[in-house]
Image (cartoon, rainbow, N blue to C red):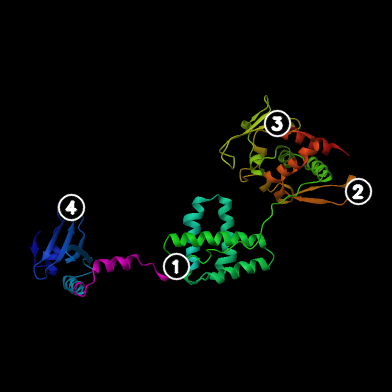
Amino acid sequence: MPTRKLTDLFVERVNPPARGRIEYFDASFGGLALRVTQAGGKSWSVFYRFHGRLRRLTIGHYPAIKPAQARREAQAALERIRQGADPADEKRARRDRRSPEADIFGAVARDYLDRHHKRNSRESTFLEAERDLEHNAIPRWDKRPIASITRGEVRDLIDRIVARGAEVQANRTLTRLRALFNWAVEKDRFATSPAAGLKLPTKENARDRVLSDNELRWLWQGCDEIGWPFGSLAKLLLLTAQRRDEVAGMERAELDLAERVWTIPSARAKNGACTRCICRTPRSSCCNRCHASGSAWCSPPTAKVPFRDSRAPSAGSTLRWSRRAAGRWSCRLRMTIIGRRWASRTASRRRSRFRTGRCTTFAALRRLAWRG
């Protein structure tokens, strides 16, 4: 390695090597070197031994640092070595140290949502978690250092949610906060989760709501009034007990009318498993209508499922049907409950009554809907 007197003129005019890099050591200051790369870059370094190991500390780049300043920086580094400190380790620690703003709760929560939750969850799950944290937790602790949040404050937040009557929401919020804090601990953002050991505040009971015989008949009549596609779609939800979006996304290619089989491909199934649904009468009439239409309930390109279509009844959230024949008032049924669980519960509750299997149970429901 060549040794030169590193003057301003020499450093300015030195030519880059043909390839790789070359280091010129300063003749007037032992250990100080100028590194010149093939691309013409120039940087200052100081070499030293710490606990018997040869170390290298980069001081800075030329022309931001001139030779005289480089010698002063090298002298300061050697002074730190005489005091028992390693300047290279100190520089690395300063570089790795996060700014205080990076460890406030709001920043950590958004990092968790973007870097972890969004990549490992379904879109709907991510959006609900984002809404929950943005509404319940972030406004309360946005600018607080995450390490300063105590167990009592987390408990107080959950108790406030319970107090406003949202017991199940309190369970969900605590679960999401626990996952967020555990992720932050794993990423060394702070030491201990304040949500560790906290129990869910509310015991949840599975819903057991099913439609009565009269409600089933009114629902079926309401579907006839609404007509195709939304009335037919709601009928298939009841008759097949399949998931709402799977029924809504039915494609013509999935129907085998000769065998009366509807095959839900694994790519569209929520559980990732291919499902075969036997289309017995009266299900086959709804499937025939879909098959004749050409594709997926004729939903517009902007709608992922027809119930989000602007043409759906009441903006796609409500089915209305008339009880005028029974001399009753108008009723509404939220479309969100006409799903896989609702239809499965309705079918299972009547299976013992009709003493039939799963397939013929829905035919019995159809016959019940025709009465009156």
Q: Nearer the viewer, mark 3 or mark 4?
A: 3
Rounded to the nearest angstrom, the CA distance separating label 3 from label 1 is: 56 Å
Rounded to the nearest angstrom, the CA distance separating label 2 from label 4 is: 93 Å
Which stretch is magenta?
Answer: 80-101
Q: Are marks 3 and 1 in contact (CB under 8 Å)?
A: no
Q: Earlier in the sequence, mark 2 or mark 1?
A: 1
Disc marking residue 327: 2
> Front-most of 200 and 116?
200
- Report the quarter where the N terminus lies: bottom left
Q: Are marks 3 and 2 in contact (CB under 8 Å)?
A: no
Circle 3 residues within 10 Å: few <14, some 14–19, many ≥20: many
Rounded to the nearest angstrom, the CA distance separating label 3 from label 4 is: 72 Å
Circle 1 residues within 10 Å: few <14, some 14–19, many ≥20: some
Asked which secondary structure carries label 4, the reply is loop
Per the image, is 241 magenta? no
List the residue tagged with mark 4: 20
List the residue tagged with mark 1: 103
State whether the magenta stretch is mostly helix, strand or loop. Answer: helix
Per the image, is 96 magenta? yes
List the residue tagged with mark 3: 279
Q: Earlier in the sequence, mark 4 or mark 1?
A: 4
Q: Are marks 2 and 1 in contact (CB under 8 Å)?
A: no
Amino acid carrying label 1: it is Asp
Residue 72 vertical position relative to residue 280 in the rendered view, above or below: below
Residue 314 picture location, percent across and down: 74, 51
> Front-most of 219 and 318?
219
Amino acid carrying label 3: it is Cys
